[in-house]
Structures are given as C-alpha cells and as structure tokens.
Image: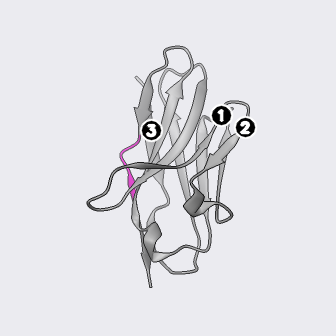
Amino acid sequence: QVQLVESGGGLVQAGGSLRLSCAASGRISSINAMGWYRQAPGKQRDLVAGISLSGHTNYADSVKGRFTISRDNAKNTVDLQMSSLKPEDTAVYYCKMIVTSSGLEVWGQGTLVTVSS
C-alpha cells in the first residue's frame, strides 16, 4: 500500500515563500506523474503544477513564474517551492502520485497554506 505524507504548509504573509514536500512510502517500484493540487473553501480541487517521470513540468497560469515543482525519483518525493505568495493562493494543497506499475492514483492528506494580506 502506497501512502503520501505532505509537509510544509502554514501561515505566511503576502509576498512570502513556502516550500511544500510530499514523500511516498510503501511498496513502490517507480512513480510516474506527480503533481500538486489545491482546493480553496467552496471551490473545486484544481491542478497547480505537475511533473512527469522525465521531468517535464506544467503549471496553472495563476502560478507560473512564482511556483516551481521538482521531484527526486530516488526518494519518491515531490516538492513545490512557492514564492511571491498572494492571498488567493490560500487553500489546502494536496499532492498526487501515479504508481507506474498499476496506474494507481494516490493522494496525500492535504496541507493548509494560508496567505495573509
């Protein structure tokens, strides 16, 4: 069974930075795509950033130039470096991984990011 554990959320002032980390544990051969999503109160969960096994990245337009996603394939981790944070970035952030062998999608429990104005 694969489990994801996120860390790094918290309260930050507008213009500040935070780094989120997500680590996978369990019986894992390799992880295909990894990504970060967020869900603000009353809104749907949306993709923030994704990264493929080869390292190709994609970002939501709202975070381009401010957020950077990275992964460590040896450690099965994915990070999200967030800079120039805005109040509208406030949300619960979730990481998601797709296990290569099974195609199983695994979600983390979520970590709250609050940006004060």
Instruction: Give the x, y percent position of residue 35.
Output: 54, 42
Contact, CB < 8 Å: mark 1 with mark 2?
yes
What is the spatial separation of the Cα atoms under label 1 and label 2, in whole angstroms?
A: 5 Å
User: In the image, is residue 45 part of the stretch drawn in magenta?
Assistant: no
Tell me the kind of residue under disc 1.
Ser
The residue indicated by pointer 3 is 4
Q: Main secondary structure of the magenta part?
A: loop
Q: In front of the other: label 3 or label 1?
A: 1
Q: Which residue lies at the image location 50% right of the left edge and 60% below the top edge?
A: 8
On the picture, is 68 further left or further right than 21? right
The kind of secondary structure element at disc 3 is strand
The kind of secondary structure element at disc 1 is loop
Q: State how many labels appear.
A: 3
Task: Specify the segment rendered in magenta.
Answer: 108-112
On the picture, is 50 further left or further right than 93? right
Q: Which residue lies at the image location 36% right of the left edge and 45% below the top edge?
A: 109
On the picture, is 112 further left or further right than 103? left
Outermost residue, bottom side: 117
Instruction: Name the quadrant containing residue 53.
Output: top right
The residue indicated by pointer 1 is 52
Q: From this view, report whether residue 78 is shown above or below residue 43.
A: above
What is the spatial separation of the Cα atoms under label 3 and label 2, in whole angstroms?
A: 20 Å
N-term mark: 3 or 2 = 3
The residue indicated by pointer 2 is 55
Q: From this view, report whether residue 85 is shown above or below residue 64.
A: below
From the image, which quarter does the N terminus lie in?
top left
On the picture, is 51 further left or further right than 47? right
